[in-house]
Every structure is written in C-alpha cells, then in structure tokens.
Amino acid sequence: MSFGTDIAWKSLNKHGEELCGDMVKIVRTKDSDIVILADGMGSGVTANILATLTSQILATMLLKGASIASCVETIAKTLPICQERNVAYATFSILQIYRDGQAYLVEYDNPSCVFIRDRKIVAYEAEEQIIDGKKIKEYRFQAKENDCFVLMSDGVIFAGAGELLNYGWTWESMAEYTLRCTRNTMSASRLVSMLSGACNDLYEQRPRDDTTVVVVRTRKAQIVNLLTGPPADEKDDERMVRDLMESEGKKIISGGSSANLTARILRKEIVTHVNYADPFIPPTASIEGIDLVTEGALTLAGTLKLLQKFEQSEFDEEFFRELDQDNGASKLAKTLIEECTQLHLLVGTVANQAYQNSELSFDISVRKNLVTQIKETMEKMGKTVTVQYY
C-alpha cells in the first residue's frame, strides 16, 4: 500500500509579537514526506530568524541526503549567537514518512511527539546520541494507516502556566486530551484546530510563548479528479470524459457546460438539487458515476477562498462550520482539504460564449486563473497536483 499524509499545523504568536518564533516546513520528495518544526530561542524577530534558518537548513540538507549529525553540526555553526547566553540556539523535531510506511522521527529539545494508534497513546523506544554536545533522540518504526502524530513546540506544554494552571499543561495531559479529540475526528486540520484552541483558552487568548501544533496522519493515497470547462475542440469531448472516468479516485465536475457534455457522452441524466439554502453559491447536481457536480466560476471562486483561508492557517470553529455547509463550494473545498492527497485537474480551454456575452464578461482566462490559483494553493498545502489541458 502506498502511504499518503494528511498534514496541518497552526501557530499562536506570543502576545504582542507580530512574528512567530516557531517555523513549520513541509518537504515532499518522490519517496517520502518530511515535516520539520523548529522553535527559535526567545520570541519575535530574533526567534523567527533562528527558526526560519533552522528549518531551511534542515530541509535543504535532508533533501540532499545529509545525516542528522551533519545537520546539527551545520546548524550549530550557522545560527547567530545569542549575546546574553552565548549560544546559537533553536530546537527542532523532524518526522519523515516514506511511501512504504517506514517512519523516522528526530527530536532535539522539543516536547516529545504524541503518537496515537488504534485509539491508544503509543510509547516507543528512542536511540539517543550526543552530537556536538547536544542530545538527539531518534526513532525508527513502521507506520500504519490512520496513525496520528502530533509535533509541538514547548509553548504547548507551558500553556496556562502561572495563569489557569500552576505548572502549565503537562505533556501527559496534552496527550490525553489529544486522544479524546481523535474520538471525534481524525482530520488533521480539525484536530489541529481543537488542540490550538485549547492552548489559546489556557493562555486566556494571550499566549505567553509562541505555540505551534503540527498534526500528521497517515492514510492511503487519495486521488481527486476535477474536470472543468469543455475542450477547445469538440472532437476531444469524448477523450476528456473518458480520461476522467478511467482515472482512479473521486470524480468531480465543475461547470454547467462540462456537466452537460459529460452527461451526453455517458448517456446519463443530470439531476439538479433544488433544496439548497445558499443564495450566493449555485446549486449542485448529480450524474450517475460522478461523485460531485457543481456550477463553474462562482463555485470555484468560493472553493478557492476556503482553500486560501485554510492554507494561511485561518481556520477555527467558524471556518469548519462554513466548510460543512451544504453547498457546492464548501463540499468541493472539504473534499480537497480532507479527502485528497493528489489532485488531477482536467481543464477545457474553450471560451464560454454565455459568459463572454454577459456583463460579467467571464471567459476562458477567468477559469484558467481560478484553476491556476487552486493548483498553487493546493501545492502550498502539500498536495500533489497535475493539470491536463484539452
């Protein structure tokens, strides 16, 4: 089985700081996904620089096959020196999950990763080594489908210290809370929102430290195929629809013209759903063999808005209420966020005469622009995206 990963993270800046001293970097390779969480010493600009340099150095070196020993040595020699403590300091966690399920975890002074499997908190043995005077913990194990890993900066376990809790939120308490949350959802984004929200509440919305939570969930690779726009040449209609139907994974159509040509070629009926409540998003429809059929430009624009909010970590309870709405944009965005590791876009390049003759003047450039932005946003979210034009 080929493994994919569902990854989401959210950071809380220390109260009064414009920049976060934690940095998360996701690196996708042909064989694996790598998640790096770096925590710079202190807060504000200096911490942000330390965390940014650490994450970038680790990502670059790991991609080139460097050992963790080389990475740590390079970081120690590269990072700026703190004048007060006379040390170049940043902590980090690295989680690498290969397509065959092999997993590798490295931790340096960050709180330990919470590992949940089969509704239980799992303890695992670490190999310790001293590199340049620094104690590094390494773990190697075989991941399984639906495993859940939670990486965190130390702001998480200090949440509430001196305020609601005498000594902060302990690792054990945080792990137990995470376990309870997984009973309600295994979605990485929703779990991150719950954990980050709990931290913010413990800090009474005034975090005393930069606080970052990263959730990584292993799952089967999930492919979503999205067809939008008729081909430039009508002779390619059948080929485009055939490519969609023969593709592995979910099948979605966005656009009335696209739906009509698909129904015609498949000799299926289009059934429009009239029981919708959103006045701004046109209704969805059904075609036998297709998982979701939506309107075109307005729905894609609404989908893009939700994807961008998610990619920029602007998600909370209100965001998920919008994501769960019964309209085409929310349904499409929810599928792309929570049920997709690979997106395949099948894009027709014919100009839509109906749009060109309207006051809105929608044409091929509008659809192409939306598709381009969706592609770029999905890639920033760590999804693999391919585009095929017709």
Image (tube, rainbow, N blue to C red):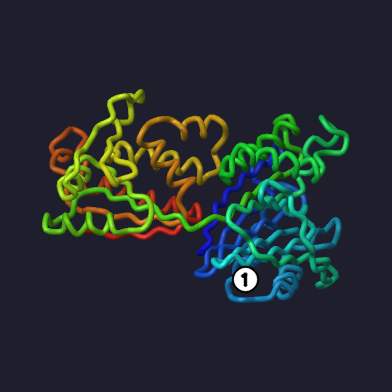
Compared with residue 190, is residue 373 higher up or lower down, i.e. above or below?
A: below
Q: Which residue is mark 1?
A: 62
Residue 17: image quadrant is top right
Q: Which residue: 43% across, 57% down?
A: 342
Compared with residue 36, is residue 366 higher up or lower down, i.e. above or below?
A: above
Q: Which residue: 58% across, 75% down?
A: 64
Compared with residue 28, is residue 182 higher up or lower down, i.e. above or below?
A: above
Task: Return the residue nearer the eye: 160 or 245.
Answer: 245
**Count the marks: how many?**
1
Residue 167: image quadrant is top right
Residue 284 placement, left or right of 84: left
Task: Return the residue nearer the eye: 335 or 35.
Answer: 335
Compared with residue 357, is residue 87 higher up or lower down, i.e. above or below?
A: below
In this view, the residue farthest toward the right is 166
Horizontal and vertical percent position of residue 287 = 25, 41
Circle 1 Cα neighbour tier, 10 Å, few/some/many (<14 / 14–19 / ≥20): some
Horizontal and vertical percent position of residue 323 = 46, 35
Residue 91 placement, left or right of 291: right
Residue 380 placement, left or right of 343: right
Q: Which residue: 39% across, 41% down?
A: 332
Horizontal and vertical percent position of residue 31 = 53, 70
Q: Secondary structure at mark 1?
A: helix
Residue 6 placement, left or right of 301: right
Q: Which residue: 33% across, 25% down?
A: 276
Query: In which quadrant will I find the C terminus?
Result: bottom left
Task: Return the residue nearer the eye: 292 or 42.
Answer: 292
Horizontal and vertical percent position of residue 189 = 56, 43
Q: Callout 1, which amino acid?
A: Leu
